[in-house]
Image (cartoon, rainbow, N blue to C red):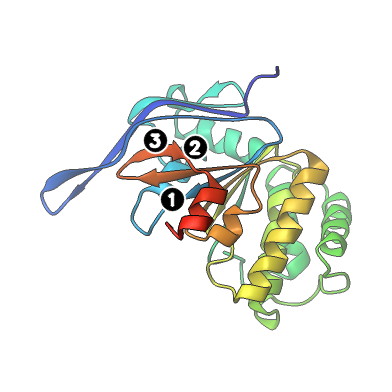
Amino acid sequence: MSEPAVVVSGLGHAYHRAGSLQTILDNIDLEVGRGETLALLGASGSGKSTLLNVIGGLEPVQIGEVHVLGHSLGALDDHARTLLRRSTIGFVHQAFNLISTLSVVDNVSLPLALAGVSTASRHERAAQLLDSVGLDGRGNDWPDRLSGGEQQRVAIARALAARPPVILADEPTGNLDATSGQNVMRLLAGLVAEQQTTLIIVTHSLEVAGFADRVCALRAGVVSPVDMQATRAAGAW
């Protein structure tokens, strides 16, 4: 068996709030295989975005260990984490996070620009991805000319641009209507399967979690497996 893409061991994380220390993550152990799609269910404030940010190197490891493709994030300084993030991880956010002053094609190719790829090569890759997400011919548009679902498709294309082995998606359908959300998830799931990319999705939606190979829940700072069939039958989420 190959080494897992992501390994979290004994992870703890806390914030100072209102003069006291509030534990957000409590001794979490988690493994995600290469090419696996994992959904993390959790209510608002449960810590799922914090967990994703720590795995993505956006927040430091406070307690425990986090390894991404064999790299210990706790052993890296801010600069080293940034370099690892650029080469290893793609992000899809609820708010799309497109740059309004860049065209669609330049938004998609931004990770490649940061990696020093030539303009011609990165625009060629961006055009291929825009075609794959159903936005062929929209590369010269500005983001505000696109619908919410289309903007999230651009965000997915951008996340895949540098062919990262890991993609982290934080409530990727949170700003979309039900139909657009289903379409976006179907697209994302298909693309990561095609590229054999590891995908971790944090969500509060059973519908979104249904696209994953495996589902866990984050409650009171602790991760536990979810039986989706039993959960749906009981209406427990």
Please name which of the two marks, 1 or 3, marks the residue nearer to the observer: 1
Q: CA distance from mark 1 to mark 3?
A: 13 Å
Q: Residue at x 30, y 44 (%)?
A: 220
Point out the image quarter for the C terminus. bottom left
Q: CA distance from mark 3 to mark 2?
A: 9 Å
Q: Which residue is identified by label 1?
A: 49
Q: Which residue is identified by label 3?
A: 60
Q: Is residue 127 visible?
A: yes
Point out the image quarter for the N terminus. top right
136 shown above or below 231: below
The amino acid pointed to by label 3 is: Pro
Numbered label attached to residue 55:
2
Most foreground residue, 80 or 229: 229
Q: Is residue 19 left or right of residue 40?
A: left
Residue 68, position as x, y percentages in the image: 57, 29
Numbered label attached to residue 36:
none
Residue 102, position as x, y percentages in the image: 68, 69
Q: Is residue 169 left or right of residue 119?
A: left
Determine whether the residue tagged by mark 2 lies in a helix, strand or loop.
helix
Residue 42, position as x, y percentages in the image: 42, 52
Q: Earlier in the sequence, mark 3 or mark 2?
A: 2
Q: Earlier in the sequence, mark 1 or mark 3?
A: 1
CB within 8 Å, label 2 to label 1: no
Please name which of the two marks, 3 or 2, marks the residue nearer to the observer: 2
Q: Residue at x 68, y 80 (%)?
A: 147
Determine whether the residue tagged by mark 3 lies in a helix, strand or loop.
loop
The amino acid pointed to by label 1 is: Ser
Q: Residues within 10 Å of mark 2 (few under 14, many from 20)?
A: many
